[in-house]
Amino acid sequence: MGVRSLRAAARALRRACGPWTPRLGPRLLWSPPMAGNVKAPAPVGAGQEQDRKARSGWQGGARTWEETEQQAKKLKSSGAEFGEQRRKLPKRKIVLLMAYSGKGYHGMQRNVGSSQFKTIEDDLVSALVRSGCIPENHGEDMRKMSFQRCARTDKGVSAAGQVVSLKVWLIDDILEKINSHLPSHIRILGLKRVTGGFNSKNKCDARTYFYMLPTFAFAHKDRDVQDETYRLSAETLQRVNRLLACYKGTHNFHNFTSQKGPREPSAQRYVLHVCCEEPFVREGMEFALIKVKGQSFMTHQIRKMVGLVVAIVKGYAPESALERSWGEAKVDVPKAPGLGLVLERVHFERYNQRFGNDGLHEPLDWAREEAEVAAFKEQHIYPTIVSTERHERSMAQWLSTLPVHDFSATAHAAAGPGAEVPSPLEGSEGDGDSD
């Protein structure tokens, strides 16, 4: 038989038996039919079906089954593979500049496992997970993303410049995606890359708070009107600032928190600046901002700093209570409401000196976000404080409790035997005796 005849016979055989494949599956090898195994011709209908199967390959059933199974496995694992691929992406250490209104929240710090007390971090972590920049298990254990906040604000306290540090996947449009899952009274205003070992709490040099209060808090209990018609005089403002200036420097603030004893070194705190700014009117009521900058503050410290000055100016406490509060004796220091307290800014001077101009990192000064910070305060923080004060009268109700405090008697009782007892004149300093 010639070469052409052999080729023609081979083509006919392939048409009858399907294309040759070296191996399909464990032992599916093609071999031509043996002469002794040739079967009788099939009926016409069966022949057409056989011809259709032949065109798709005699091993088509096995091949189709194999391809279908592979596709199913591929589809089934595609979601898991995507998640696994995302998990393998490198995480980057960043800081987020946050602003929020704290009304209705039990502070900043999350209480894992306690859904009864909602915190700012509950909403933040939920938004981070839903936006896709951290995996879900990082939300359950925040240590996995190296999360740290600059300040642990108390119940009801707001912030215009809170900073948190954490590791995330730097997804596209990350700020927009996070904010899309946050309520309007919590905003992420900025993002910056930082060094891998950055910790927002430990690297923070100082924190600036302001306390917004209606000026009738400074109205003297015996001489002035005690309502929103009161206007702060220049003379009273000067006295307020003279008293506030006493806080500057390093003092033992153990009487300004419930967490420290008088001899604990950590009760010593350094205040860099404190003053009351010029008053302004909102919705017919006059307000003022007391700004305080310090290295760090203890729980309730600023609210008690404000509370004691208010008690002195109103005539409930003598000025000597300030000096006495830094001694070891216990002094009953009133705590102003949390509504007016706002974390305004956190400072990173030492970090900026070392890394701010190294060509790899940008300084943490938030200059570009100043307009957004100011707008957030005007839209969410100031109106909340004003409206809450008008409707709930938190400051007015707190002022009504000041006569209950006995500033000098508490100090005498706590002094103990052998301790220095203030002279009777100290109890009558200032504008009036304590009750």
Image: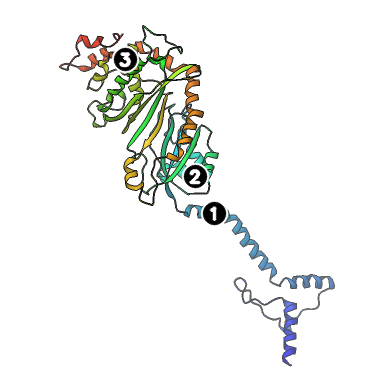
Within 10 Å of disc 3 (Cα), the crowding (few <14, some 14-19, many 20+) is many
Amino acid type at image mark 1: Phe
Residue 406 position by quadrant: top left
Amino acid type at image mark 2: Glu
Which residue lies under the disc numbered 3? Answer: 312
Task: Say whether residue 92 is left or right of residue 292.
Answer: right
Residue 11 position by quadrant: bottom right
208 and 135: which is toward the camera: 208
Q: Separation of disc 2 and disc 1 at Cα?
A: 14 Å
Q: Separation of disc 1 and disc 3 at Cα?
A: 64 Å
Mark 2 element type: helix
Residue 139, percent from left and from top: 46, 42
Single out the mark in the foreground, 3 or 2: 3
Which residue lies under the disc numbered 2? Answer: 136
Mark nearer the N terminus (1 vs 3): 1
Dividing the image into 4 quarters, which one contains the C terminus?
top left
Mark 3 element type: helix
Residue 78 position by quadrant: bottom right
The answer to whether marks 1 and 3 mark residues whose Cβ atoms lie closer than 8 Å is no
330 shown above or below 36: above
387 shown above or below 423: below
187 and 248: which is toward the camera: 248
Q: Residue furthest top?
A: 222
Mark nearer the N terminus (3 vs 2): 2
Amino acid type at image mark 3: Ile
Could you tell me which residue is drawn at 49 percent across and 36 percent down?
187
Which residue lies under the disc numbered 1? Answer: 82
